Amino acid sequence: MRPATTAIHGGFDYDPETGATAVPIYQTASYAYASAAELAEVFHGRAPGHVYSRISNPTTHALERRLAQMEDGIGAIATASGMGAISALMLGLLRAGDELLTTRGLFGGTVSLFHNILTRFGIIIKTLPPDADAFARAVTPETRVIFAETITNPTMDVLDLEALSHIAREHNILLVVDATVTTPVLGPIKRLGADVVVHSTTKFINGHGTAIGGAIVDTGSYRWAGGRFEDLATLAERAGQMAFLARLRNVVYRDLGACPAPQNSFLMLQGLETLPVRMPIHCENARRLAEFLDGCASVKWVNYPGLADSPYRPTVYRLYNGCAGALLTFGLADGADPFACLDALRLARRMTNLGDARTLALHPASTIFAEYDARDRTEMGVTDDMIRVSVGIEDFEDIREDFEQAIAKATE
């Protein structure tokens, strides 16, 4: 099935008992079996079924199957949040002495996880420029994972994932890609060489700001049996390509407890059904708003990879089917207060989320990156004048008029 069809029908046909075509919400903590022997068989993985919703749940399982199909993966695990997905993934892969290569401009929560949590376990984090050659030079025998975002939030850098994939293949390193900003609709990241894909499903996949969630998808591209993860290589002798997902679900995911509530999985499924319709509107509105801001005399700079003068325009168009996403950042003319602009907005909401049907705006330096000092923020590419906008699916003229009047008030 093609993406728009998979978003509606993937992972679930209908309930044979009731005929329901919407995935039912299995709001239960545990599951009963007719005999102790039957429960034991399911518990040990020798028979299909569910035993405890911290490990698996039918509603969540339908979401996982649908997401895996949309990313052309071999399986997926849904989590309680996007950060829960990245945390479970990294803690399930890395150990003391392992190196993780990543780039500047990542989401503030991911930066905090890498530098404040993973380093406490002896994991080495190397932050590099958004350039494939820098990654090639940084690889050592201890490197295990390359982590990248499709379009970095909030710096709007676009890494060439195909080039990163070649580096990863050459050194037998795992390439993990956070595709939250581009979603499966702009193209399954597997085709660009990603081994594992993560999403904050809270964002565009949910699309309505009603639930928190995340997901991990194994694309099936990495050969775990011959990989650089000893425990997974051993398990792959029995579990084959499903080794990573099996260990993640039955050990890491189970023990960390990062499972989503069934109600939240249901809400993600509802949002996923309309994602292929919403995403093109998000992207088109963002392109038009970026072009409007770029031509506004009271705006000092605009950062959007789809602009004609962006160095990332050729890459983002080549990788993501001509779409540059729905995020942009901009700064006002010298001396103008970004808070004054934000406070003057009437339609756009001042919120820390992104990917909502509504247009959202915030000041990254005082919110997501508030825990870092000015020097650190500068190194991350976050300036004090930066305003980030997640462009919604409202009528574009209403969005434009809102920012036009807000900028005028902030710069008068």
Image (cartoon, grey):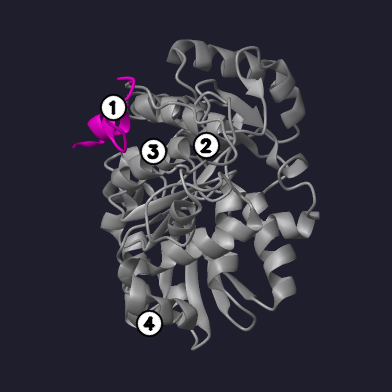
Q: SS for tag 3?
A: helix
Q: Quadrant of the N terminus?
A: top left
Q: Residue 32: where, in percent of width, then height? A: 52, 41
Q: Residue at x 47, y 83 (%)?
A: 230
**Which badge, 1 or 2, comes first in the chain's sequence?**
1
**Mark 1–mark 2 distance (CA, rounded to whole Å):** 45 Å
Q: CA distance from mark 4 to mark 2?
A: 34 Å
Residue labelled with disc 2: 328
Q: Nearer the viewer, mark 1 or mark 2?
A: 1
User: How many residues crowd mark 2 within 10 Å: few (<14), some (14–19), many (20+)?
Assistant: many
Location of mark 1 (residue): 16
Foreground label between 3 and 1: 1
Q: Nearer the viewer, mark 3 or mark 2?
A: 3
Q: Judge by depth and name the residue closer to the eye, 197 or 323.
A: 197
Question: Disc 3 marks which amino acid?
Answer: Ala
Magenta stretch secondary structure, dominant: loop
Q: Is residue 394 left or right of residue 239?
A: right
- Identity, as a three-letter code, of the amino acid under mark 1: Pro
